[in-house]
Image (tube, grey):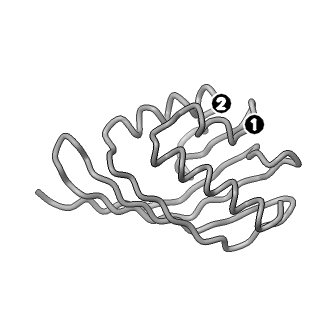
Amino acid sequence: MTPEAFDRWLVAYGSAWEARDAGKFSAIFTDDVRYYWTPFGPPKEGREGVAAAFSGAVENQRNIRFRHEILTASETRCVARWWCELERPTTGRQVRLEGILMIVPTSDGLSAEFREWWHSEEQSG
């Protein structure tokens, strides 16, 4: 995957997250994707698994703002650093997240595998 194609993938990822749109989010992955949300848990499997996990995650997120920086892009691995800010509607608290993600791209611009390492900081109330 070229850096330009990876940037388009990341824009789609961030746009879907900001819109809280599980359909658009899961569409950037292959039907049989393995999505590792953390390095220790089992993967979410397939688009349906990713969409369900995503829907649950964004249920308590509003005013999402996503940014990214490409670290490397190749035919076998693409890696980016990302930042996100959002609000918890139930508490009004602001949350900051920062992480690294890695995808295994396909020739048609999707992700067959996704792994991320991230941390969050939530404003105390």
At horizontal 33% and vertical 51% (from top left) the residue drawn is 63
Q: Residue tagged by mark 2?
A: 47
Q: Is residue 57 left or right of residue 106?
A: left
Name the disc covering residue 106, or none.
none
Q: Amino acid at mark 2?
A: Arg
At horizontal 75% and vertical 31% (from top left) the residue drawn is 32
Mark 1 vs 2: CB contact within 8 A: yes
Q: Residue tagged by mark 1?
A: 30
The x and y percentages for residue 43 are: 61, 39
The correct choice, above or below, for 74 with respect to 115 in the image is below
In this view, the residue farthest toward the left is 125
The disc, 1 or 2, on the residue closer to the chain's N-terminal end is 1
Q: Amino acid at mark 1?
A: Thr
The correct choice, above or below, for 17 with respect to 22 in the image is below
- Give the class, few, some or many, for how many residues have Cα within 10 Å of label 2's Cα (few <14, many ≥20): many
- Give the class, few, some or many, for how many residues have Cα within 10 Å of label 1's Cα (few <14, many ≥20): some
SS at badge 1: strand
The x and y percentages for residue 30 are: 75, 36
SS at badge 2: helix
Q: Quadrant of residue 76?
A: bottom right
Q: Is residue 7 left or right of residue 17?
A: right
| Alpha carbon separation for disc pair 1 and 2 | 7 Å
Q: Quadrant of residue 2?
A: bottom right
The x and y percentages for residue 87 are: 28, 52
Q: Quadrant of the C terminus?
A: bottom left
Q: Quadrant of residue 24?
A: top right
The x and y percentages for residue 82 are: 52, 65
